Structure formats: C-alpha cells, structure tokens
Amino acid sequence: MKKLNILALLIFVAGLVAVFTFDTATTRQIQSRVMSLLSPFIHSSAAMEQAAETAVAPQVNPVELKRENDEQRVQLERLRIIQQKYNQIIEENAKLRQIIEFKQSAPFKMTAAKVIRRSSSTWWNSLIIDKGSLDGIGTDSPVITSVGLVGKTSTLAPHMAKVILLTDEMCRVSAKIEGTLEQGILAGERAALEVRPELHLRFLNRNSNINAGAGVYSSGEGGVFPADLLLGRVKRFENREISGEAVIEPAVDFSTLDYVFVIEMQVAEPTLEPASTPARTKP
Amino acid sequence: MLFHPISIILLLLTFMVQEFIPGLEIAQFATLFLPAVFFFSASVAAPFSMMLVLAFMTGFIWDARHLPGVVESLSGAEDVFGTGADLELGAGTHPLPFGLSIVLFGMLGRLLQGIRPLFKRGRLELPVLMVGLATFVWLLSQYLIITFLRGSLQFPAGVWSKMITDSLLAMLAAPLIFLLLYSLARLSSYEIKYEGLRYRFDGR
C-alpha cells in the first residue's frame, strides 16, 4: 500500500471516530445546518412539483368555483358562531375553575404550516413543512390536522422542519381505545412506506373485548402528545404470546396532506384565548 | 489535476439535484439516490485516497440530511418499556447512528475499486451491474442494522420491492454518470481509461 493511501486511511478513520463521538446537540446542529443549506432546493422542487400538477390538472369551471366559494362562506359564518359560543364557554369554564381553585392544565399553542413535500428517503417515513425553529417550532412537537395526529417534528431548519409520520416505527404514542380501559403503545410498521400502512397498538391485555371500528386516541401519558387526539380506528384484534395487539387503520390520509398544525405545549402562562383549530378529539 | 476537485463539486451538486427527484409511490417511494450512485460510480474511477474523501463526504452529508433527528433521553431512567416520555420521544426505536453511512460507503467504495482495471479498459457492463449491487447492499445493510438494533426480524414484501427498484434505478443512471466521468477526465487530462500501447493512426 502506498504511503499516501495509508495516510488517507488514517485521516479517514480519525474523521470517522470524530463523527461517532459527536453529542446529540452537535449532531442536531449539523443536521439543521445541512437542511438550511438545502432548503432553497427543497422549496424550488416543491414549487416545480406544484407547477407541474397545476399544468396537468383540468381547468376549473368558474361557475363551480363560485358555488364552492359560496358554500365555504356559509360554512365560515357557521364556524364563527360556533367559535363565539366556544369562547364564551371557555371564559365561563375559567371562572368556574377559579371559584373551585381547579389546577388548570397547560394550554397549547398551535402553528399552522404548509406541507412542502414528502421526503423520499431510504427507510424513514417523513415529510417537510414550511415552518421551522425561527417560527417557534421545537423538536418532538406533535403535528396534527383537523382529522387527527400526523406525527412529530424532527430535524429543524430556520423556516423548515422534518416531520416523522405516525406510520414510522420511530413515532410511538401512548394510546387508549374508546369505550374500554385498554391502553397501549401505538407505532407504525418498520419500513412501511406505502401511502396508508397499518399501525399496531401493542401491550394490550390478552383476550380483551375490543370491537372493530372503535376509535383509538392518544392517552397523554407520555407527555409528548396531548390527550384525546384521534389516531385511528381498530381494524382487528390479535392475541400474541405475551400481550394483545390491535391493528389500527390511521385516521389521517397521509397522501392528501396540505396544511398541518404544530403544537407547542411549553406555553407556561394559562390564557383564555382558545386554540385556533383543534384536532378532532374524543367526544 | 482538476478531476478530483470537480468530482467533489459534482458530488455536492448531486445532493442539490436529489431534492428534485420524486419518489415512486407504486414502489414504496423508491427513488434514484443520486449522491450514492455518483459516489459508487466515482469510486471506480478515482484512486483509493480520493475514494475515501468522497465516501466521507457522501456519508456525512447523507446522514445529516436524511437521518431522523437524534433521540435525546428526558430522564436517565431505563426500564423495560422506558419511561412514558422517553418512549414517545423515541427511546428504544434506535435510528441509525450518525456516521454509519460513511463506514458503509467506505467499505462499498473499496469493494468497487476491485473492478477498476476493467473500467480502465473501457468495459462498463460489470461496473454498471456493480453500482446496482452496491446500492442494494447499502440499503440492505441499513435495513439489517435497523433490524438488529430494534431486535425483531421483519421483512415485509415492500422492503424488497423498494430495494430492487432503487437498485434498478441506480443501474439506469450509472452509465450516464460513467460517461460524465469519462468526459470530465478527458477535459481535465486525467487518465481513467488506460490506452497503453494502442496503435494510433494520425493520417501520415
């Protein structure tokens, strides 16, 4: 082996050792920097994708558009009325809580974000949104839609964040089944990269009486995800060697996500302001 | 010797181009992993020391861009199922360690250097096949390491279809990258193709 090759190999090994000894903060900083550097290209690719979709999409009928617009105006008015009533109830609730000195749970702030694109990676199920650390988003924050839980944030850039989807094995949620006392851990399948893969709710009691179609909600036990977010519906229940396992159909269709909300639960001061668009919660 | 710095610049460019390559929904979002394919192709063309430089850069940037965020434990407590918050933060799910791709690229690059003599003679059939094989081995190694770390052996059919489609796409792109490298070598007077004592007729 030439001297130059030996030297190159030594430098390579030294560099490798240095990389393996990076602590979490350094690794996150590097990931954030690389994502920031590539963010113009990610934005451009998303814009190109959107332009191509628009070019291919059939022309919109103006009459149909007007009808839809009218319908949405009516819907908006209805929602405004509901919001007013909701505000009144929140206010009344806060007063009653003050009277009985009830310890109020920390409210959460929500940031709306646009889904830029779905990441094509090796084994990870993720997408990218257009809000990042400078927009007040933190790592491991829950991401929801009006339907239910989407996942949690991962790597952050100043105006961009990667979201690990609920269908990824790395996103695990403490969950409960509607109408039962059963609680377990919900996770996706390994490398299940299809559009709507099944989820698995593990560590349930064996021979539990769980009906197909029952709603599965976050329990809030873990502290990362707020309680009562809809996760999916039970498809079937299977008895395993040690515990029971329910196969869950996710509530959210991950292929049609346009806008999501990122929850920040670290807000210290309780406020009477209602959250803007809460996800569907347990009735 | 312009060939090596230009190779590095091209490698960096592939990371930018990668952002524009969509995934195939029908094959588990399989896609062309351009930086990896460029590295595998370049490692056949470049000498050992340059291959190591390219392996380090490819692995480092790949992990920085594509690995999920590293999990940080909230508490030091460890039990069978982890503490609640640790569990939701991802404790026990083990993402791949940052830097592992450098090792994989380094090893596969060394393997690909074994077919350099063939490549120097201008034969592309085996190098193209080897680039596809290297892509397959890279993905399979990642998957096996994830499986090993998480402790349960699962091989759904989708995993195979994704790995095979990714490898086929890599084999489709490899000849173009080889041709690009040949052109680059010609422009920068770098000798990739050994032409030895071949008789040249100059018309006189």
Image (cartoon, helix red, strand yellow):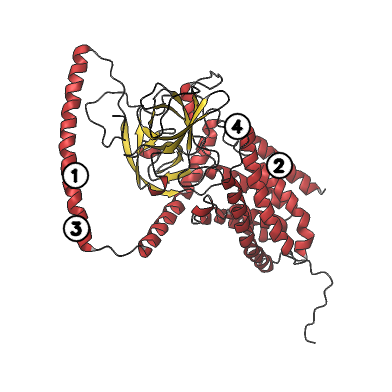
Q: In the orientation shown, which residue stands out farthest toward the right?
A: B197
Of residues B200 and A280, which is closer to you in this image?
A: A280
Query: Gap in Å between the C-alphas at discs 4 and 3?
Result: 53 Å
Relative to B195, residue A173 above or below: above
Q: Amino acid at mark 3?
A: Lys
What is the quadrant of the N terminus of chain B in the image? bottom right
- State the residue position of label 3: A66
Disc 2 sits on a residue from what chain? A
Tell whether label 3 touches label 4 (CB within 8 Å).
no
How many marks can you see?
A: 4
Of residues A261 and A227, which is closer to you in this image?
A: A227
**Among numbered discs 2 and 1, the one appearing first in the sequence:** 2
Residue B119 at x, y = what percent?
Answer: 75, 62
- State the residue position of label 1: A76
- State the residue position of label 2: A11
Residue A62 is left or right of residue A137, and the answer is left
Same chain for mark 2 and mark 3? The answer is yes
Q: Amino acid at mark 2?
A: Ile
Q: In the orientation shown, which residue stands out farthest toward the top?
A: A100
- State the residue position of label 4: B150
Relative to A240, residue B57 above or below: below
Q: Amino acid at mark 1?
A: Leu
Tell whether label 3 touches label 1 (CB within 8 Å).
no
Of residues B129 and B164, which is closer to you in this image?
A: B164
For image coordinates 24% across by 63% down, the residue present is A61
Q: Amino acid at mark 4?
A: Arg
Q: Which structural element holds mark 3?
A: helix
**Among numbered discs 2 and 3, the one appearing first in the sequence:** 2
Tell whether label 2 touches label 4 (CB within 8 Å).
no
